[in-house]
Image (spheres, rainbow, N blue to C red):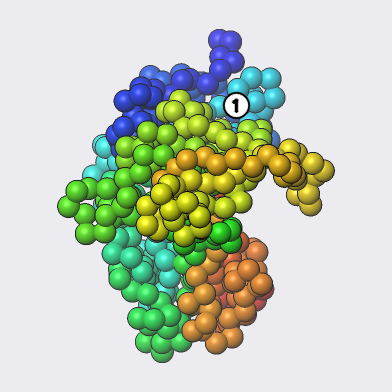
Amino acid sequence: MAVQPKKREMPVQDAKLRARNFMEVALGYSEEDAVIEAQRCLNCKNRPCIEGCPVKVLIPDFINKIKEHDFEGAYSVISKSSALPAVCGRVCPQETQCESKCTLGIKFEPVAIGRLERFVADYHNKHFNGEPTLLKSNGKKVAVIGSGPSGLTCAGDLAKKGYKVTVFEALHVAGGVLVYGIPEFRLPKEIVSKEVETLKKYGVEIETNVVVGKTVTIDELFESGYNAVYIASGAGLPRFMGIKGESLKGVYSANEFLTRANLMKAYKDDAHTPIMKAKNVAVVGGGNVAMDAARTALRLGADNVYIIYRRSMNELPARKEEVEHALEEGVKFEVLRNPVEIMGYNNQDDKRDAKNGFVTGINIIKCELGEPDEKGRRRPVEIEGSEYILPVDCVIMAIGTSPNPLINKTTKGLNVNSHGCIIADESTGKTSKNGVFAGGDAVTGAATVILAMGAGKSAAEAIDEYLNNKRRIG
């Protein structure tokens, strides 16, 4: 049978309907869709797709199981490498990782590996109610700080090795960025909850409302009997541009905006921490977080939502699929534009045009692309005299985050770099403090879910080796 050149289409909600609801946009493959797509896999001998996966899922093996209609067998293959398959199938940038290495992609569209992973995980979650086989405890305790993708991965892998693992989460719900950062329409929270419950079945304990560095310190964790600590506290400290007007009412970091909407449901009329329901919103940035914030603002009732990005559409760092969905839903892209000032009562001479302390507009300057920077991307160069004001009543800054310094400041002997990221060995996660390992965004700065998971997986192996003196780490 001839290979189909294109991926099996992913069914999605109608753009006009989904732009005003928080239900998941992508509806998932049927069994028939999954088998047809799996049959596109060439099952090549060198298996380059595996090398493109940060957690090294045996991709051809699970796809072969789908071809055989053995969906539970496919899940068994994936779960040997990935602790969060339903999450990865939805939010991982497969197009730049496993799918970018797919041999079929040389001539045709690559196999839809992410969509197949999602199908397998959803099938398992719907049909399987059994209990996992637990290993006998080895008597050793590990503390994991943070319940995001890196922390959950490390915790799950260690629990499967017989360790007693406790995850300490600062918020009141486990999941980290998976629950506070990624919107419901991309990653339903019941999916995250299901993955967390699966880890609990392996014996992982999760303590919420524990702020390590304040509620308890890392040194105190060791004193209480933990043999090793893995720091996976993420990068939740937002960055701002430092331009005039950022203190006006109606200016949010994307982190705050998404946390309020996703975790605290602040858009509801009876919310304890309500969020402003703006009509005209500017989102500064071009990554996945910017797309999430813009699409969330639409769903909260905004009439116009603008992405303000200083390079062109071709340089947008967000996933192609997320950009396409945003365009379909009506988000407007103001590219080759850079904000220079946020306008409002506090910085306008004409007080008649602004409410007291509220945003009324954003002053933008046009740009053109110049010479490449150190990363090979062409630098945006501002065009003198091209400024104009875009009338908005809300500005969301989605230009990146950095790690919160609380753990660093309360842990003696833990080295950090100039950006506040913990310095850790790339392959093991070992830090400058004995028995302490770190990974994910706390080390790299804001990155992808799957890279954080890869760090958690590597750290689990290294912690196991460290506690069993299998070899010298670092």
Q: Quadrant of residue 455?
A: bottom right
Check disc 1 and report its element: helix, strand or loop. loop
Q: Identify the residue at horizontal 38%, vertical 19% (top origin).
A: 32
Give the image quarter of residue 441: bottom right
Kindly give the residue lying farthest to the right in the view shown: 371
The single residue placed furthest to the top in the displayed view is: 1
Rendering coords of residue 58 (x, y %): 54, 41
**Could you tell me which quadrant the C terminus lies in?**
bottom right
Residue 122 position in % (x across, y down): 34, 37
**Residue of label 1:** 110
Which amino acid type is shown beneath numbered disc 1? Pro
Q: Nearer the viewer, residue 242 or 89?
A: 242
- Say whether residue 147 is left or right of residue 376: left
Question: How crowded is the residue under tag 1: few (<14 C-alpha within 10 Å), some, or many (20+)?
Answer: many
Which residue does the image show at 49% across and 37% down from the upper left? 306
Instruction: Name above or below for residue 106 compared with residue 383.
Output: above
95, above or below 420, in the image: above
State whether residue 139 is above or below residue 38: below
Of 80 and 378, the residue lying toward us: 378
